[in-house]
Image: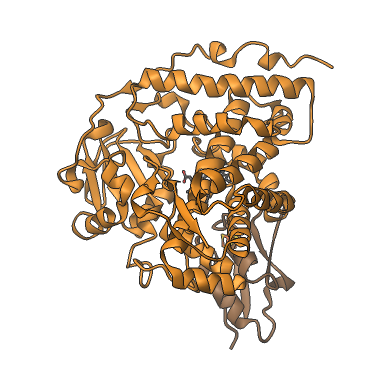
Amino acid sequence: MKIQIDSEVCQGHGRCYDLAPSLFGDDDEGYGKVLRAGVVPPGEEQNARLAVANCPERAIELIEET
Amino acid sequence: MAVDERFARDFREARGDEPEGTRNEIVTGPVADWATDFSHTEPEWAADPYPIQDDLRQRCPIAHTPRFGGGWLPTRYADVAAIAYDTERFSSRSIIMSNFRPPRDVAPIGGSPPISSDPPFHHDARKLLLPAFTKKAVARQEPATRALCHSLIDAFDGQGVVDAARDYAQHIPMRVIAGMLGFPPADGPQFRQFVENTLEGINLPPDERITRMSALFDYLLAQIHDHIDNPREDLTTFLINAELYGRKLEPSHVAGTMALLLIAGIDTTWSAIGASLWHLARVPADRERLAAEPALLPTALEEFLRAYAPVTMARLVKQDMQWHGADMKADDWILLSFPAANRDPAQFERAAEVVIDRQVNRHAAFGLGIHRCVGSHLARMELRVALDVWLSRIPAFTLADPSMVTWSTGQIRGPRTLPLRLG
Ligand code: HEM
Ligand code: SF4
């Protein structure tokens, strides 16, 4: 599973890095960024989904690998 | 050190004040039908706006009023979001719905950048502020905030009943923002006055409102002069030195942004802390659970922000148009109710209930789109610390007398009198 933030849509609400600090961080202006190139380690899928579901701007995309 | 000529004269004279703009007849008094004559300044709305909004969402999702020179009130999440995102058709030239519209040529900057600004200027004015308000930057205020909360509770000094709005919630954002701007902490009570003048008293005659605003700008100008003479590590000195497009900021921009930070930081957070305590005083099950499970606080706090969102904004329609079936005219107001959006059942399950362990909570209390609250990380820190300290020191409390609770009027909603019985 991978995660990706659309930087055109992100407004820096910070819900992602509040809820899943192991997957998301922030830049110097508070915009969200994915850690580890967006790779979600096993066991972190639930946190990734939680961040996606709470982003007020719907800026985070979840890419399920097959 | 060189004198900063920008502030040598009052910038209001330079601008040739007595602002132009349009004024309309002031209409007050009871509302018969909220769908055709709404007013956010009437006591019924202040006391409990949610049944009104829920009713409108069902029978007239974009309500109208001839008051304030004409305006619209969308109550669905989808409509509120669409307007917040559509800066082409809706301007932030004024974000307080009153009886005065500033002239069109104040756009795209407006009186208090970036909240009053439209693209493209908005982005640049906002960018200046962002680094000072990141989660990491505001974490530096946390120890002092925590100490302040403890000292406020120490001062209750064994009283059985305290006013949690006046003696607790109010002081927290006031002291934090005064510290960040570098204003004397003892000036707090004056800020209270400035905030009231700007956000409440919407229906005072415009000239009276202008006179009252002058007191705020006199205060800010005095602070600016003091910071020019004695520069320090704070937001005021930062704004005086900040540059945009290779030049120092216009004096009106410096003062306007200072005014914004002072006003936007205080009433809002005060309201959020107060409304959360009000809820916990009324619902013992939630209070007991939160006191026993402090780890739930971050989730509960988002739910309080959703259910009791303190901030409603306004926009001005740019041109005559049909919008989602409404016949909007240029310069009509939009009362942009994030609180109403946050209670739309189409967006939230169990929208009318307060669910303190709600896992999925895509609320809009801090706005949506380019104007997302710059202070949201600061406000969340203050709210978390305020509730954490309160619950650890005072785990048991109830409303002393529900009929004594009063709520602010206007676009920022929260308890202004909140007598709680402790223990
Ligand atoms: C619980 C407390 C708060 C709430 C609910 C809140 C809510 C909001 C909302 C809804 C907006 C969007 C305005 C719009 O769309 O027109 C906003 C903007 C803003 N807020 Fe807050 N606010 C809070 C606290 C603060 C604090 C503590 C500060 C900083 C001292 C602050 C500074 C700002 C600024 C500078 C803007 C303008 C952002 C822009 O236009 O780009 N707010 N706030
Ligand atoms: S929650 Fe969404 S808007 Fe906020 S920082 Fe994360 S990606 Fe950006």
Q: Foreground residue, A26 or A65?
A: A26
Residue at left 18%, top 58%?
A: B59
Residue furthest to the right in view is: B1
Q: B329 above or below B352?
A: above
Q: Foreground residue, B142 or A34?
A: B142
Q: B392 above or below B38?
A: below
Residue furthest to the bottom in view is: A66
Q: How is the image coloured?
A: by chain
Chain B, which colour?
orange
Q: Is residue B300 left or right of residue B135?
A: left
Chain A, which colour?
brown
Residue at left 65%, top 36%?
A: B178
- Image location of residue B205, percent across then percent down: 33, 21
- Image location of residue B65, percent across then percent down: 22, 39
Query: Residue B411 appears in which quarter of the rendering?
Result: top left
Q: B301 above or below B123?
A: below
Q: Foreground residue, B380 or A46?
A: B380
Residue B371 in sight = no
Q: Is residue B33 left or right of residue B259?
A: left
Query: Residue B334 appears in which quarter of the rendering?
Result: top left
Screen quadrant of the N terminus of chain B: top right
Q: Is residue B209 left or right of residue B326?
A: right
Q: Foreground residue, B130 or B50?
A: B50
Residue at left 26%, top 30%?
A: B69
- Image location of residue B284, percent across then percent down: 45, 69
Q: A44 above or below B276?
A: below
State ligand 2's quadrant.
bottom right
- Image location of residue B370, percent across then percent down: 52, 48
Residue B272 in sight = yes
